Image: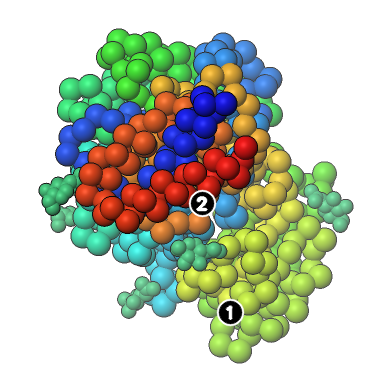
Amino acid sequence: MRTLLTLTFFVLLGHIANCKALPIRSGRNIFNKLLVISFDGFRWDYDQDVDTPNLDKLVQEGVKAKYITPPMITMTSPSHFTTITGRWIEDHGVVHNIMFNTTTKEKIFHKETQNCSEWWDNGAMPLWITAQNQGLKTASFHYPGGGANYSGQAVNRALVESHTHPDSNETEWRENIDIVMGWFSQENFDFVTLYYGEPDKVGHRKGPETEDRKAVIMQIDRTIGYLIEAIRRHDLTHRLNVIITSDHGMTTVKKNPEVNEIKLSNYINLFKLVDFELLDYGGFGMITPKQGKEEEIYRSLLNAHPNLTVYRKQDIPESFHLAKNSRIQPIVVVGDLGFNINSRILIYVNRGDHGFHNGEMDMKTIFRAFGPDFKKNYLAEPFDSVNIYPLMCKLLGVTPAPNNGSLSFTQDMLTFHGWVSLMVVFYLAGGNASRSQMSFILVAAMVFCMFIM
Ligand SMILES: *[C@@H]1O[C@H](CO)[C@@H](O)[C@H](O)[C@H]1NC(C)=O
Ligand SMILES: *[C@@H]1O[C@H](CO)[C@@H](O)[C@H](O)[C@H]1NC(C)=O
Ligand SMILES: *[C@@H]1O[C@H](CO)[C@@H](O)[C@H](O)[C@H]1NC(C)=O
Ligand SMILES: *[C@@H]1O[C@H](CO)[C@@H](O)[C@H](O)[C@H]1NC(C)=O
Ligand SMILES: *[C@@H]1O[C@H](CO)[C@@H](O)[C@H](O)[C@H]1NC(C)=O
Ligand SMILES: *[C@@H]1O[C@H](CO)[C@@H](O)[C@H](O)[C@H]1NC(C)=O
Ligand SMILES: *[C@@H]1O[C@H](CO)[C@@H](O)[C@H](O)[C@H]1NC(C)=O
Ligand SMILES: [Zn+2]
């Protein structure tokens, strides 16, 4: 009974410490370091039809969520930015992979946007910056958004992918891990995000249900084996937590004659009615009508194709968490799973694609975690990727910026150890707490204990 009471008390202290502002860190090593790795386009079930000994080992040695749900728009930049900010897309404003200006009609593609702060910096603070402002040292290795400035602040160290970066060079993958391990062990970085462009690329080019995709998954698995070995080599096993995740899944594009493909020019005169569009980019598109043409476009598309859904901006379901943003155009189109939104011609470049509704299983993605603060052999229920953010903050001991995530979906993954470190911080912070604050906390703790007895 006494043990239980003490335990409860500590857990409660953890809760309280978590709610209050933490003191500025002064090089204290209470919190473990955190590495977040994103393998772009890693569908939730990609490890189930390939031999993946290292990922399997991690199931025993860490946490696995059955799958996680990316935000609706299941695209690389929007989804990665939700993970690093904990904000819905309507809040963080990175609403597409393509940066655009509906006035100038300018479109800038994914990789070229990485250094464009005006695209990323819309008020939502990514964790790198928030953590830096609380005394941590952070870095981004190719992670989307890492190359921008936020309110004038750059990430302590940011490598931005070059235009010609090879996506699947295994030697380079390993070198990147060695570089990041050096940052942690020799330069005392606290938080690093590492991004890989696969298996997205192979999923697009060859399709998700191919031997090529399976080969890339095996390469990723070997890389994870290399990572585990590198962590040991750098003596980081007991100091580094690792989260492995991704931004969206992948589905096979449906084509003629299997289906009647969606081609918007069959239903509307794009030249006459449309002022600006983002189409021909997977299962999601946006249209800015010419003056006074919104109703005509909407009516024409409403029942145009059984596998096409059209929304006026004001009718976008709240569950999408999209409509609030000024960058969302007046008309939004979403294809059923596998139905790409083509404008005028059918371009058969991609065998696989994403951008479809985030409720579709093929759009779900992975979540794995291991390290000193994570339980072993723990299978977590599915959750929304927006909830990764408060988990990262908790692991790092960072007071979160305003966000749309909740710790309640992930806190059971953590060992008691994680709570204890929070408690220590509470005591340190408590050194300056007023007597009435302390009394309040103690009374609250007692009430809490009575409540659960
Ligand atoms: C688009 O470009 C115009 C002209 O350069 C500029 O005035 C406007 O602010 C830009 N719009 C956005 C949303 O950046
Ligand atoms: C970020 O700010 C720094 C310092 O003001 C500047 O040198 C750098 O060019 C900026 N980078 C971007 C991507 O805007
Ligand atoms: C982004 O900026 C960095 C530093 O200024 C530069 O080294 C890199 O080549 C740029 N990347 C792109 C994609 O423009
Ligand atoms: C792969 O990367 C390594 C290390 O960066 C480099 O030496 C090698 O030439 C690359 N291989 C290919 C095929 O590009
Ligand atoms: C496409 O629409 C047809 C007719 O409504 C429906 O039966 C089918 O399930 C749809 N396909 C997908 C992938 O949702
Ligand atoms: C998301 O979080 C922001 C910042 O706290 C808040 O302004 C916004 O209303 C939240 N969105 C939802 C849907 O709760
Ligand atoms: C407590 O307050 C003192 C003086 O105001 C300050 O120097 C010290 O850093 C504070 N300690 C903590 C843990 O916040
Ligand atoms: Zn992606």
Q: Which residue corresponds to the image point at 35% horizontal and 32% vertical from the top-left?
A: 421
Image-quadrant location for residue 402: bottom left
Residue 233 horizontal side relative to residue 343, left or right = left
Residue 102 horizontal side relative to residue 129, left or right = right
Residue 334 horizontal side relative to residue 8, left or right = right
Residue 299 location (% of width, % of height): 75, 79
Q: Residues within 10 Å of mark 1 (few under 14, many from 20)?
A: many
The quarter in which the N terminus is drawn is top right
Front position in the image: 26 or 97:
26
Q: Is residue 142 visible?
A: no
| Amino acid type at image mark 1 | Pro
Secondary structure at numbered mark 2: loop
Q: Mark 1 near mark 2, Cβ–Cβ under 8 Å?
A: no
Q: Which residue is the site of mark 1? A: 289
Of the two numbered discs 1 and 2 on the same chain, state the one appearing first in sequence.
Answer: 1
Front position in the image: 85 or 302:
85
The quarter in which the C terminus is drawn is top right
Q: CA distance from mark 1 to mark 2?
A: 34 Å
Front position in the image: 350 or 214:
214
Q: Which residue corresponds to the image point at 40% horizontal and 67% vertical from the top-left?
A: 106
Q: Which residue is the site of mark 2? A: 405
Tell me: residue 305, above or below residue 43.
below
Q: Which residue corresponds to the image point at 68% horizontal and 78% vertical from the top-left?
A: 297
Image-quadrant location for residue 249: top right
Q: Residues within 10 Å of mark 2 (few under 14, many from 20)?
A: many
Residue 413 location (% of width, % of height): 54, 31
